[in-house]
Image (tube, rainbow, N blue to C red):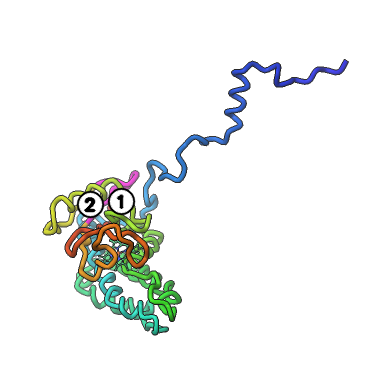
Amino acid sequence: MPRRLFTMRMLPAAVLGAAMLAALPAGASDPVGVAAKGGFPEYLFLEKLPRAEAEVMARKLARAVVAARMIIFAHGAKITDPKLGDKGFSGAVFEEQWRRSTEDLTIDATPAQKQIFDKLYWAGRQVMDNNQDRINVQGVAWKHFLPAKWEREMGQVLTARTGIIIKQPGRTYRSPVNVPDELERETLVHYIDAGRDANQPRVAHTTMGKQPVVRYMEPIRLLPPCLPCHGKPKGEPDMLGFHKDGLEAGDLIGLMSVTLAVSD
Ligand code: HEC
């Protein structure tokens, strides 16, 4: 007589239930598309500075990035001119203007600081070179190239090469890269509550994983030309379709946030 096959009917209900659960993919009941908990933006901090220098350098880096944003901002009319092809705003042209406008920051730089500045200029230039086709498109006004976009891309290139983190968390961010972490969120709230005259940078000596770091943050405030997108009326679509922030010139829109590893 052939041996009887094991049939489903012979299994107790509890065993069947467990078997069905095991058939579901692991984590099937977890929320989908949310941020993973824990973790850090960097794990290998290639460039480090002594604590005594790190805070000053973080401030200088923030100043240098603001200067670069201003250079790109000043080229805004040219970049958005649909009639123009080549804008003459190459990586080399940009780097030359950027270096010149930040001479006061680099003049007294230590060799270690100078090395970091060179990598900063390099990262900024990479991003300009990488965006040339976009910037030079003819027949289109809006090319999705803005100071904020340059900074986002530059920050990622710089972090890849140095482990230094430069980002611009927003109070209502348009790019998900600009989502504030806990400290940045607290700092945004601090500046919003403190009003328009609160421009004193905030510095925290903390750790990122096992690495001691200096975190430097200062407010980014709106200027009148920012208002077609970040101004009023609140909720009305801007030229790109994002809802306007409903803010005024002088209001806080985001932070210049620099994280630098310390070596001692
Ligand atoms: C043409 C519309 C437009 C104008 C004008 C504009 N922005 Fe934005 N802003 C954007 C867009 C789009 C992003 C997202 C850029 C990206 O990362 O791709 C952004 C991002 C930002 C961010 C980063 C946080 C975030 O929202 O992701 C800051 C800070 C910011 N802008 C400040 C300013 C300031 C200051 C000005 C004026 C000097 C300005 N913007 C002018 C559209 C605009």
The N terminus sits in image quarter: top right
The circle drawn on residue 180 is 1
Q: Is residue 176 visible?
A: yes
Question: Total number of numbered labels?
Answer: 2
Residues at discs 1 and 2 in contact (Cβ within 8 Å): yes
Residue at 31% in and 76% down: 76
Q: In the image, which residues are magenta? A: 206-217
Amino acid type assigned to the residue bearing label 2 in the image? Leu
Q: Pinpoint residue 191: horizontal percent, then vertical percent.
A: 17, 53
Q: Pinpoint residue 211: horizontal percent, then vertical percent.
A: 32, 47
Q: Nearer the viewer, residue 255 or 8?
A: 8
Residue at 22% in and 66% down: 63
Residue extending furthest toward the right: 1
Q: Which residue is mark 2?
A: 188
Residue 207 is inside the magenta segment:
yes
The residue tagged with tag 2: helix, strand or loop?
A: helix
The answer to whether 190 appears left or right of 116 in the picture is left
